[in-house]
Each structure stands twice: as structure tokens, then as C-alpha cells.
Amino acid sequence: MLETRGLAERRTGTDRRRHSIHVTAGGRDTVEEVRSAIWAAEDDLLSGLLAHGRDSLQDILERALEVRR
């Protein structure tokens, strides 16, 4: 699927049993677009919080992740 969309490509070296997957320029562009969309959505979601509220939320979420590990 990634290959057909031009986001990644398979490359074969001297050992044809082995393939490596490489992200194409289009794939890198898509990653940047998605990252930007995520940051914009996060900013919109958290727009009602002051800076210290965002910091507190981040601390709580980081602690929750640590508990899960």
C-alpha cells in the first residue's frame, strides 16, 4: 500500500532474498503534513488551557505512561 502510493519503496541488494524498505521524498512530505495536522489539532484541543495547565496535563500523562511500562 505504501509502495503503490509512492510513500515507500523496496530495494534489493546483492542478496535477492533480502529487501530493505526506504521512505521516499513523498513519504517524508506526508509525514511532515501529518505531524503538522497533529500539532494543529493538539493546539486546538488545548487552546482553553493556560501554559501551566498544559504543563500539568503533560506531567500527568507522562506519569500515566510510566505506570503502564
Image (spheres, rainbow, N blue to C red):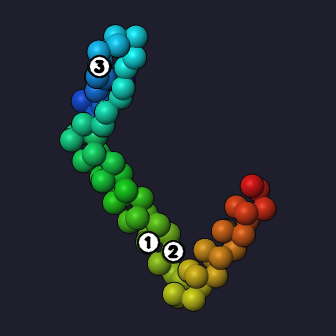
Measure the C-alpha gap from mark 3 to mark 1: 44 Å
- Dot 3 crowding, Cα within 10 Å, few <14, some 14–19, many 20+: few
From this view, report whether residue 20 is shown above or below residue 42: above
Determine contact: label 3, label 1, CB under 8 Å: no
Number of residues whose C-alpha sits closer than 10 Å to that of mark 2, classed few (under 14), some (14–19) or many (20 or more): some
Of 59 and 40, which appears nearest the observer? 59
* Residue occupying image coordinates x 22% and y 40%: 26
Using residue 44 as the reference point, say whether residue 8 is left or right of it.
left
Kindly give the residue lying farthest to the front in the view shown. 14
Mark number displayed over residue 46 = 2
**Residue under the image location 28 percent in, 45 percent down:** 28
Mark 3 lies on residue: 13
Residue 25 percent across, percent down from the top left = 21, 41
Tell me, yes or no, whether the two marked residues, 1 and 2, touch with CB atoms within 8 Å: yes
Look at the numbered disc 3 and give the secondary structure of its residue: loop
**Residue 43 visible within the image:** yes
Amino acid at pointer 1: Asp
Q: Quadrant of the C terminus?
A: bottom right
What secondary structure is found at the residue carrying circle 2?
loop
* Residue at the image position 24 percent from the left and 47 percent from the top: 29
Disc number placed over residue 43 in the picture, else none: 1
Q: Quadrant of residue 52?
A: bottom right
Residue 4 is situated, as x and y percent measured from the top left of the image, at 28, 22
Q: Nearer the viewer, mark 3 or mark 1?
A: 3
Q: Quadrant where the N terminus lies?
A: top left
* Residue mark closest to the camera, 3 vs 2: 3
Q: Amino acid at mark 2?
A: Leu
User: Which tag, 3 or 2, sits closer to the chain's start?
Assistant: 3
Residue type for callout 3: Gly
Q: So how many labels did they put on this image?
A: 3
Is residue 2 shown to the viewer in this render? Answer: no
- The disc, 3 or 1, on the residue closer to the chain's N-terminal end is 3
